[in-house]
Amino acid sequence: MKLKLHWQIIICMIFGTLAGLYFNNFGNDSFLYTFIILLGDIFIRLLKMVIVPLIFTSIVIGISSIKNRTKMGRLGLKTFLYYISTSLIAILIGLFLANTIQPGIGAANIESIEAFDTSKLTSSTSILDILKRMIPTNPIKAFANGDMLGTIFFALFFGITLGSINAKSSLPILNFINSLYQIIMKMTQVIIMLAPIGVFGLITKAISNMGLSIFKELGLYALTIASGLTIHLFIVLPLILFLFVRVNPIVHFRAIASAMVTAFSTSSSSATLPVTMDCVKDKVKASNEVTSFVLPMGATINMDGTALYECAGVLFIAQALGIPLDASQQFIVVITALLASIGAAGIPSAGLVMLFIVTDAVGLQSDAVAIWVGSMLAIDRPLDMFRTMVNISSDSVGAAVIAKSEGEKLY
Ligand code: ASP
């Protein structure tokens, strides 16, 4: 029987830890060490390679499904408001917890960060400045430079316009981008299958550089993320159900239980989508119209768990690097975490790849960042399972809220 990916990753983590400890004790100037480190670097490069096409195609496909008719417009507005507000609530929970628990403090004296040049930090003077930076003067250049904000902005605008022009003109492009999306998704999945090898390299590198103290720091980080996800799943979403749908949250969670379990075990909102749709249509009893409008787009762009994770994760990295982010930089983190969660594909570990968007946006660009992200990858699977469950739960709550607001009789 073939071992499940997360078991493979966990086993490789253990071997990586052992190898890292070995190199930490006996020196790391051998060819073998260089080769193992290369494996981790290659894996990170592969992940980075697919970011731009993945964001572009998944946003265009999600957004272009909104058609510009009155009801569609209304549904679109409500859905959009729901997505944005729940993601923002999640981000603020992450922001609050990361600032109060401060999981990264104490990791600041590891030697690998000494060379970090804090003057490279991007600071923003105003919201207008951030908005301006989002608009690329040349989209191709934005793609080529890996300018995420520019890419996301162009994709949103492109997707909205694509959905509004007549079918005869839009269909060829839509089909093309859809095929591209499928291909890139597949490529990403193949890359993620390499995760055990990549994790082995990354963990070896992290442990050989830092020793075992890394797990102490990451334990608190994992706890911070898990607490945030728990608050969102068990307090915020039930409150929304209670206030806007007037239903006992337990009734709702029972209705979507199989989708939650599927999300937890696949770590993929996209893979879970058929199950989510089935639960929401069959048990929540939302109309076909609302279900097929809210859920597929939700699986691509509404990711509360991922949003919370992006924000808390980047604050953790900044703390670990000993670089406190001021209010305006934290504001950039909030906005880019929102965008990154929108841009993250509904596949395993997509959120982790997106961390680079947020770190880049505040100017955290150094090898030390990659090392921290690499170490976070090592313990990402359980967190990914949890946040994916939160992601699809929020989608289903959104469908219930919107169906209710359209006067549908539910449950
Ligand atoms: N795996 C998550 C999802 O599919 C995305 C993420 O990595 O945060 O929803």
Image (cartoon, rainbow, N blue to C red):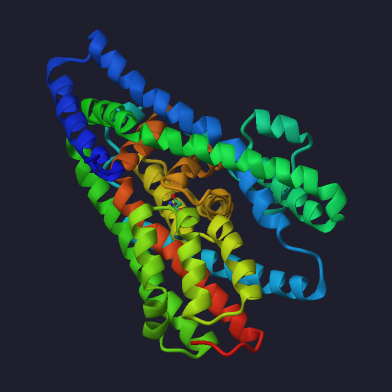
Q: Quadrant of residue 215?
A: top left
Q: Residue at x 47, y 43 (%)?
A: 355
Q: Quadrant of residue 141?
A: top right
Q: Please name whichever residue, 171 or 358, is drawn nearer the observer in this view of the structure.
A: 171
Q: Residue at x 59, y 72 (%)?
A: 291
Q: Please name whichever residue, 271 or 379, is drawn nearer the observer in this view of the structure.
A: 271
Report the side of 295 relative to 199 (left or right): right
Give the percent coordinates (x, y) of residue 156.
71, 51
Vertical comparison of 243 with 378: above or below: below
Position of the N terminus, as image quadrant, is top left
Q: Residue at x 56, y 37 (%)?
A: 184
Give the percent coordinates (x, y) of residue 71.
77, 76
Report the side of 160 relative to 346 (left or right): right
Report the side of 28 relative to 401 (left or right): left
Q: Quadrant of residue 292?
A: bottom right
Report the side of 115 relative to 142 (left or right): left
Vertical comparison of 276 with 236: above or below: above
Residue most extreme to the front: 1
Give the percent coordinates (x, y) of residue 47.
47, 33
Residue 245 visible, this orientation: yes
Tell me how many marks there are. 0
Vertical comparison of 46 with 313: above or below: above
Q: Residue at x 28, y 44 (%)?
A: 6
Give the percent coordinates (x, y) of residue 249.
40, 83
Residue 149 visible, this orientation: no
